[in-house]
Image: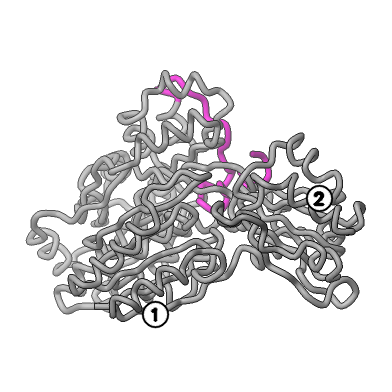
């Protein structure tokens, strides 16, 4: 048994430490906070137990004493317990109290430090907390002291006269009082001050003004918790060094409807451009009940002239069955290979195979035209793909005189999307764009979300990877807002970055 107090950082999943990630991946129980990004739970094993115990704006899911007891109880059961906390466990995170409780009850524990929001949020807002020209020291303080204290523990005169950068955590409720106390203690009213809300996340916003004007400006601009308060001359650097808030999709909620197995690349591209990625997988990839027929066909590849891969999933499942037969890429030595697009071609290259043909446009129709031009009459062609898919490609190849065999390798089923979470985000105005990467994603999406409901939110843009997908969308009475010239995920994301 063992408990780990893990700092998750301030929100950007990329700021989680490697050690923290590895512990999450083997933990039996994950106990997590409100401010710990839920994306971290993707590292958990499917069978791991997850417990939410967070606090938000004074509303506690569980009192701290109960949280302490749960951590200890789960560890006593012989489990590896990951206590995931926003920021750093020991930086105003009550991790010290949890560690003391575990120590008193002889529960083995370790602390995995995290990047505190004071450092990360300030850096993402373009504010270096120390700088040779402005500040040689920094002071971290809580803006939310213990309510049972009779008087403040802060020496306001010392803070005001320190010359240090002052950083207050959890201080929005007391912002007027914090500013008033510092001013009364002699801090110059013109001292630069900043607020950073939801630091390091796609929802980040920051503002700066003078210390004296800060409470009024915060109210005027609608800044509420969670916010970090930074006070000092280093705030003057915000305008020139604020790199994060210049990302083109910052603050934009973009829904990804692809299957989980395919969504990561698109999510990474969107995240890199600042988007809030909303996962809504409308498709799940499942293996077939039996691969006897598939392996029989794959065992006779020398009978085919062409193998056409219409998706990366087709490539992955094809090679899984090829390897299950104890064979490798050399089995395709007598075949020419086609890939429907660059993503499929890249997946082929990972298996040491370069496509002989990639169409100009990445749709089945273009594959059929291109192969027809190369001469497919009397050729035998194998098409590894999903069990249920459009039959246009094999039909057109047969019309051209080819013998086209479809090889089912996996099934696609409606995905386990988080419908209620999506609807809540839609109501809150957090959804700005929904992306569709195939006709199946469109059909499955509208099997969960009525098209009429989406028509009530005309501000939500709809993006399709290509004309076939856009045509499927039109059947539901909705118009495609964005469609890239090149029918690829990178091109679609780049279009969103330019136009959304």
Q: Quadrant of residue 119?
A: bottom right
- For this rendering, which residue is in front, 133 or 203? 133
Q: Residue at x 37, y 39 (%)?
A: 441
Residue at x 47% of width, y 42% of height: 255
The 10 Å Cα crowd at callout 2, few under 14, some 14 to 19, many 20 or more, is many
Tell me if residue 477 is in the magenta stretch.
Answer: yes
Q: Would you name the residue on which mark 2 appears?
A: 208
Up-down relation of residue 457 to residue 295 (above or below) = above
Magenta-highlighted residues: 474-500
Q: Earlier in the sequence, mark 1 or mark 2?
A: 1
| Residue 110: assigned label | 1
In this rendered view, identify the residue nearer to me: 409 or 431. Answer: 431
**Hey, which quadrant is residue 330 in on the image?**
bottom left
Horizontal arrangement in the rendering, residue 474 relative to residue 151 (left or right):
left
- Side (left or right) of 102 relative to 287: right
Left or right: 245, with 266 as reference point = right
Dot 1: few (<14), some (14–19), or many (≥20) neighbours within 10 Å?
A: few
> How far across and down, in percent of the image, does residue 45 sit?
27, 65
Judge whether residue 493 is colored magenta. Answer: yes
Horizontal and vertical percent for residue 274?
A: 61, 52
Q: Which mark is residue 69?
A: none
Q: Residue 209 in the image: x percent, y percent?
A: 85, 48
Helix, strand or loop status at disc 1? strand
Task: Report the residue at 40% width, 57% height from top.
Answer: 64
């Amino acid at each position: 048994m063992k408990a780990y107090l893990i700092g998750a950082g301030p929100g950007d999943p990329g700021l989680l430490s490697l050690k923290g990630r590895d512990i999450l991946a083997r933990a039996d129980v994950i106990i997590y906070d409100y401010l710990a990004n839920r994306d971290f739970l993707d590292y958990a094993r499917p069978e791991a137990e997850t417990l939410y115990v967070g606090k938000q704006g004074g509303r506690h899911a569980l009192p701290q004493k109960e949280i302490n007891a749960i951590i200890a109880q789960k560890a006593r059961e012989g489990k590896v317990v990951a206590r995931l906390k926003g920021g750093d466990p020991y930086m105003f995170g009550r991790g010290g109290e949890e560690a003391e409780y575990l120590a008193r009850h002889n529960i083995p524990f370790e602390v995995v430090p995290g990047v505190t929001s004071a450092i990360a949020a300030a850096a993402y807002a373009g504010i270096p907390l120390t700088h040779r020209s402005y500040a040689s020291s920094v002071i971290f303080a809580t803006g939310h002291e213990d309510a049972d204290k009779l008087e403040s523990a802060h020496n306001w005169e010392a803070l005001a006269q320190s010359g240090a950068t002052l950083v207050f955590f959890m201080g929005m409720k007391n912002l007027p009082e914090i500013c008033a106390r510092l001013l009364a203690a002699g801090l110059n009213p013109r001292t630069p001050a900043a607020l950073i809300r939801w630091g390091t996340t796609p929802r980040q916003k920051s503002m700066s003004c003078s210390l004296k004007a800060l409470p009024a400006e915060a109210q005027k601009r609608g800044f509420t918790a969670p916010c970090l308060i930074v006070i000092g001359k280093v705030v003057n650097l915000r305008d020139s060094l604020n790199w994060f808030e210049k990302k083109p999709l910052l603050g934009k909620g973009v829904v990804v409807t692809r299957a989980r197995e395919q969504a990561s690349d698109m999510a990474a591209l969107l995240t890199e451009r600042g988007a809030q990625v909303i996962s809504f997988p409308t498709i799940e990839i499942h293996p077939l009940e039996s691969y006897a027929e598939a392996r029989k066909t794959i065992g006779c590849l020398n009978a085919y002239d062409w193998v056409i891969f219409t998706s990366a999933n087709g490539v992955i499942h094809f090679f899984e069955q090829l390897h299950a037969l104890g064979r490798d890429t050399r089995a395709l030595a007598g075949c020419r290979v086609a890939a429907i697009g660059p993503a499929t071609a890249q997946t082929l290259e990972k298996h040491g195979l370069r496509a002989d043909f990639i169409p100009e446009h990445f749709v089945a129709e273009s594959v059929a035209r291109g192969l027809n031009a190369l001469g497919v009459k009397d050729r035998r062609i194998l098409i590894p793909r999903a069990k249920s898919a459009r039959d246009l490609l094999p039909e057109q190849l047969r019309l051209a005189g080819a013998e086209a065999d479809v090889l089912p390798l996996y099934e696609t089923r409606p995905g386990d999307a988080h419908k209620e979470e999506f609807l809540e985000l839609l109501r809150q105005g957090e959804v700005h764009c929904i992306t569709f990467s195939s006709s199946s994603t469109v059909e499955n999406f509208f099997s969960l979300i009525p098209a009429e409901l989406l028509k009530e939110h005309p501000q939500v843009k709809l993006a399709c990877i290509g004309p076939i997908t856009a045509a499927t969308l039109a059947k539901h009475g909705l118009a495609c807002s964005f469609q890239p010239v090149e029918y690829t995920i990178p091109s679609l994301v780049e279009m969103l970055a330019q136009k959304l």
